[in-house]
Amino acid sequence: MWGSFRMAKDKKQSRPKAETPKGFRDYFDQEVSERNEMLQKVARVYHHHGFDALETSAVENVDALGKFLPDVDRPNDGVFAWQEDDNSWLALRYDLTAPLARVYAQYRNELPNPYRRYAMGPVWRNEKPGPGRFRQFYQCDADTIGAPNVVADAEVCAMLADALEEVGIPSGDYMVRINNRKILNGVLELIGLDDQTKRLEVLRVIDKFDKVGVSGVAELLSVGRLDASGAYIDGVGLSKDQAAPVLAFLTAKGDTNEKTLLNLREVVGNSVTGSEGISELDMMAELLTIGDYSSKRVQLDPSVVRGLEYYTGPVFEAELTFEIYDTKGKKRQFGSVAGGGRYDDLVKRFTGQTIPATGVSIGVDRLMAALREKDRSRTETIGPVVVTVMDRERLNDYLSIVSELRSSGIRAEMYLGNPKNFGNQLRYADKRCSPLAIIEGSEERDKGLIQIKDLILGTQLAKNATLEEWKERPSQFTVPKKEMVSKVQEILRALKK
């Protein structure tokens, strides 16, 4: 008998852990609602600028993703991929740009040229998760394919500025910073740095300028340096004479765009590539000025290089300049929330022909965090109006009240739990962040009245209050039933102010 009991016990299946996979997260109503509202505002700006929406498959052929991942040494290791029965490999999209390149190559004979599109949605990266670093996150992109002139780049930068202001970041609290990779390429030509691997290392070092400063970049360009943890980071190996023009390029930003361009011309000397980049940067600055995008919104900044190797011309970032407090209580600027640039060789992988393209990507989670820091996004969710149930035999009456509210455009629901304990209904309304509770007992019904309970005090709700105690609260009042909708609408309008 003991053996039989033991066997039965061994066969009992263990329960799975109820936990989110490492590197992923769950989004609840408030976050989802705020994100959707923000993305709708961004979409309106993009649409206003003439861009069309595009929603691509979440899955791509691994070959379509190519080598254009941040770590070019292991191009396919950063994706969630699997092999099909026919030995082909598929992967969850790593970003929204590679799918666009595939779509354009696939449908280019049917699409307008140039083709302007925006896309919003989740992307997945098979990377080691860390604080604020997730394996799934949202991106919001806008790109133009088929326009070789930097007018398209200027348009994207202007549109990015408009989008930030539309979602609640005012002029003065952000800066769109612009540079051109051709200028740096010209500098690297001047110092004789032809090795592509070394050039990419230089890009990555310059990209750390905001964190390590000029002296830190100088060390990383040459012999290396100790980081904050005490670990030694190898340098690129440039000589002092080679590093000097790179540092001059990096620090060429002047008080005005004109001064910045003058400094850059001195740095690139007679480099044809560098001079071409400066001319493009000059044209972008002029176009943005004509469009009323002043230096308070958009500036030329040579320190912006972007770490990815596929950028071929203008590059840009949107940086939020207002101060926040970090986890140690120290003030710091919020930092970058968007970035992009020109990538004229990406579609070429599919077509064999160089197809000009430029675009920008907004880090949705970063921008949402910024809006919360600025307190420009609602800190509390307003849930549905809850119609309480006083008599389980009158469910049809309560459903009728819910229908009347919904028909008038009011978000509402009927309490579906056990109505016996009225306090539980109020606690439920509290968890739902309900602004109002509708109460209709037999006495109110006979008199044609409705009680409306204002619940906006939220945390001050009496969790163990009885019905009598609730009636004594001044925020509970009675109105004729025929006035219920108008009164609820009046209260809700006041809450939105």
Image (spheres, rainbow, N blue to C red):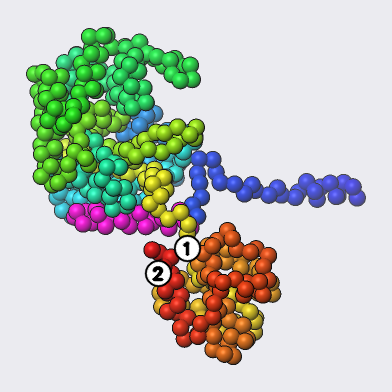
- Dot 2 alpha-carbon crowd within 10 angstroms: few under 14, some 14 to 19, many 20 or more: few
Identify the residue at image location x=32%, y=44%. 362
User: Quick check: 494 above or below 253?
Assistant: below
Identify the residue at image location x=34%, y=54%. 39
- Mark 1 residue type: Ile
Front-most of residues 348 and 190: 190
Is residue 438 in sight in this rendering?
no
Task: List the residue tagged with mark 1.
Answer: 382
User: Quick check: 258 above or below 107?
Assistant: above
Picture coordinates of residue 206, whole percent (x, y): 30, 24
User: Quick check: 27 above or below 95?
Assistant: below
Picture coordinates of residue 292, whole percent (x, y): 14, 46
Describe residue 173's horizontal placement relative to residue 291 as left or right: right
Task: List the residue tagged with mark 2.
Answer: 493
Q: Quadrant of residue 158?
A: top left
Question: Contact (CB < 8 A) between labels 1 and 2?
Answer: no
Q: How many marks?
A: 2
Q: Quadrant of residue 360?
A: top left
Range of magenta residues: 29-57
Identify the residue at image location x=37%, y=29%. 71
Front-most of residues 345 and 199: 199
Identify the residue at image location x=11%, y=33%. 282
